[in-house]
Image: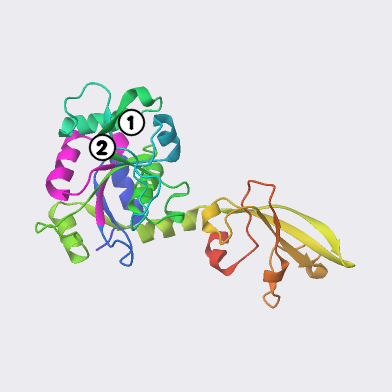
Amino acid sequence: MFTAITKIIKDAKKGKMFILVDDENRENEGDLIVPAKKIKVKDIIFMAKYGRGLICLSLDSKQVKKLNLQLMSPINQSRSNTAFTVSIDAAKNITTGISAHDRAYTIKSAIKKNASTKDIVKPGHIFPLISKDGGVLVRAGHTEASVDISKLSKNGSSAVICEIMNDNGTMAKGTQLVNFAKKHNLRLGKIDDLISYRLSREKLINFKKSSNISINNQTYIIKIFENKLESMCTWNTGMWIALMDEFDNGSSDELPENIDYSKMRLKANKTNWSMIFLLLEDFTSVLA
């Protein structure tokens, strides 16, 4: 029923449209997705005719800064905290901006490596979304998933997405999405599988260094680990270190299970690193 992420990536690399569905306890919806680098007029037509949802452009934070895009609302009160920016049109070579040709051209204008504020006008008919740095490992949404797939398929860091709506106006879910994918010969993947795919292949926590420290005549070994994704941690800022007794003489990076390490946390505020206390259970799969 669901396609392996490796096959989704292969389709994306060819510019073929696919569907990703999020968790059933979240939106439980499916989005049509095409890497923005590969978008064609016919893809916009398909999304408008069969997807029927809002056609959006997922962008990473770097591209958003190049275009100087502000959030649609400074206070995000949406249910899923989707980061909509002000809508855009291409600054030239389009008519009203709403045609399939115009929207495809606007997308191409916005994702150029050398894109700037001169390439777009605001408001318009394409709705940019800001993907969180760290992708689905930080936020398990279609915005982040679409950008992650584009990156994994070496198609840049942007994607065009559109929700799938049923004929009666309700959102397609579950079996309805499976039937839609079969009818249109599209692969259907899960964002949960994309999260697992990345966790199994990426090294997210790195050992930085270790040293000794004496506290109340007791010697400890300090071991410092860096977590690349701040938002994955329970603690979002600062440096976290592990204090370990002399028991292992620094010869191991493993911690015994019978010690309450929660009382051994020290925080150094004067750093922009995010560090994580070694081998918390939640991160076992990441460290493997």
Q: Earlier in the sequence, mark 2 or mark 1?
A: 1
Residue 131 seen in the current view: yes
Tell me the element at label 2.
strand
Mark 1 lies on residue: 110
Q: Residue at x 23, y 33 (%)?
A: 104
Residue extent of the magenta highlight? 30-56
Q: Residues within 10 Å of mark 1 (few under 14, many from 20)?
A: many
Q: Residue at x 71, y 70 (%)?
A: 263
**253 horizontally vs 220: left or right:** left
Mark 2 lies on residue: 126
- Name the quarter where the N terminus is drawn: bottom left
Query: Toward which corner of the image does residue 4 lie, by quadrant?
Result: bottom left
Q: Tell me where residue 32 appears, x and y as whole percent.
A: 24, 49
- Name the quarter where the C terminus is drawn: bottom right
Q: Residue at x 44, y 39 (%)?
A: 61
* Mark 2: amino acid: Ile
**182 horizontally vs 155: left or right:** left
Q: Tell me where residue 273 appears, x and y as whole percent.
A: 63, 48
Q: Residue at x 59, y 59 (%)?
A: 235
Tell me the element at label 1.
helix
Query: Toward which corner of the image does residue 197 lie, by quadrant?
Result: bottom left
Distance from disc 2 to disc 1, alpha carbons, whole Å, reads 10 Å
- Check the image and report above or below for 49 versus 122: below
- Check the image and report above or below for 261 versus 151: below
Q: Are marks 2 and 1 in contact (CB under 8 Å)?
A: yes
